[in-house]
Amino acid sequence: MQITTHSARITGPLAYLAAGGKMRHIPIGPCLLERTDDGSIDVIWGANGQSSAALPATVIQAAHEDGILQLVD
């Protein structure tokens, strides 16, 4: 499996479904995006990369188009 990683920045509210079925927001700030061969995208954040959420590519694309997610590299 090949993984492609990009640096990005969250600039506004980007929701994900957390454990227990609650909707949460990824914090504003730097993150990593990891895309795998199967097309899933993991958003990773936190000082040590300790938090992550898998989001559909359509959600990531919409966030990018809306300016909520900015690619750094």
Image: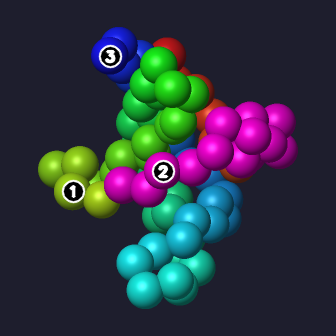
Q: Amino acid at mark 3?
A: Met
Look at mark 1 in the image and give the residue it sits on: 50
Q: Is residue 49 magenta?
A: no
Rendering quarter of residue 51:
bottom left
Please state which of residues 60 and 48 is positioned toward the viewer in this rendering: 60
In the structure shown, which secondary structural element does the residue marked by tag 1 occupy?
loop
Residue reaching furthest to the left: 48
Disc 2 or 3, which lies upstream in sequence?
3
Mark 1 vs mark 3: in front? 3
Look at mark 3 in the image and give the residue it sits on: 1
Q: Residue at x 44, y 42 (%)?
A: 42
Q: Amino acid at mark 1?
A: Gln
Total number of numbered discs in the rendering: 3
In the structure shown, which secondary structural element does the residue marked by tag 2 occupy?
strand
The boundaries of the magenta stretch are: 52-67
Query: Measured along the vertical axis of the image, is residue 57 above or below residue 73?
Result: below
Q: Are marks 1 and 2 in contact (CB under 8 Å)?
A: no
Look at mark 2 in the image and give the residue it sits on: 54
Is residue 14 visible from the viewing direction of this image?
Answer: yes
Please state which of residues 73 and 37 is positioned toward the viewer in this rendering: 37
In the structure shown, which secondary structural element does the residue marked by tag 3 occupy?
loop
